[in-house]
Amino acid sequence: MNDRTERPRYEIRAQHTDTTVTVYQAYSPAIGLPTARDGRFPPAWKRDRMTWIKPSFLWMMYRCGWGTKEGQETVLAVEISRDGLAWALEHAELSHYVREVHEDQGAWKRALRSAPARVQWDPERDLALNPLPYRSLQLGLSGEASRRYADEWTVSVRDVTPLTREVHAAVRAGERERAAALLPVETPLDLRAPRPVPATP
């Protein structure tokens, strides 16, 4: 399947098992390295701030510039419980107002303020980090969701910075097939998330 094969516009795709889902984040080495070493977020990781998790490896590459952006040099693959992700999605609100979904802007703002998670759908990326016509889930966690993510849902943490560099080197060398073969296998995940438009029957 090539990058531009038709897919549903809004679909969660991830590396997953029956019980876990892998999401990606990028941090400075001061946070990322001890997190990977210990398999959990250290006390220095602020549990009262919003944190964004991304099931798409390539979207993470777009966000962190292949691990070259300041403060995002260490790329982590965080394996979390499937039940935890389902809880976050169940309690999530869209990150922006959509007239077809929300009663009015006031109702959306009230829901957003009280929601511990927020969903944002951004264009998925190809190996060149160009936008694709279908969307990738970004999930913001705050308050209770952020604390649960760090202290309850996290099953394992891997430092995938070496993989990031290897894929990037293959892309820069024009070795597209080798780069694609190195990517984590992400398949559709049957968990519901708020969408900007009503679901098609």
Image (tube, rainbow, N blue to C red):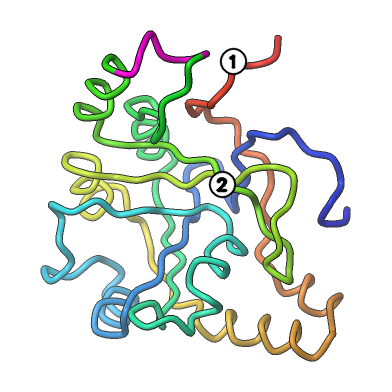
Comparing 26 with 178, the one in front is: 26
Q: Label 1: how many residues lie within 10 Å, few (<14), some (14-19) or many (20+)? A: few
Q: Amino acid at mark 2?
A: Asp
- At a point 49% along the width and 80% down the height, the residue shown is 67
Left or right of 135? Residue 146 is: left
For marks 1 and 2, give the CA distance. 17 Å
**In the image, residue 58 lies in the stretch drawn in magenta:** no
Return the mark for residue 198.
Answer: 1
- At a point 62% along the width and 64% down the height, the residue shown is 58
- At a point 43% along the width and 57% down the height, the residue shown is 79
Return the mark for residue 179.
Answer: none
Q: Residue 25: x percent and y percent?
A: 41, 64
- At a point 28% along the width and 49% down the height, the residue shown is 149
Find the magenta span and give its range: 100-105
Is residue 58 placed above or below 189 in the rendered structure? below
Left or right of 114? Residue 174 is: right
Question: Where does label 2 land, which residue?
Answer: 122
Left or right of 7? Residue 26 is: left
Q: Amino acid at mark 1?
A: Pro
- For marks 1 and 2, the one nearer the N-term is 2
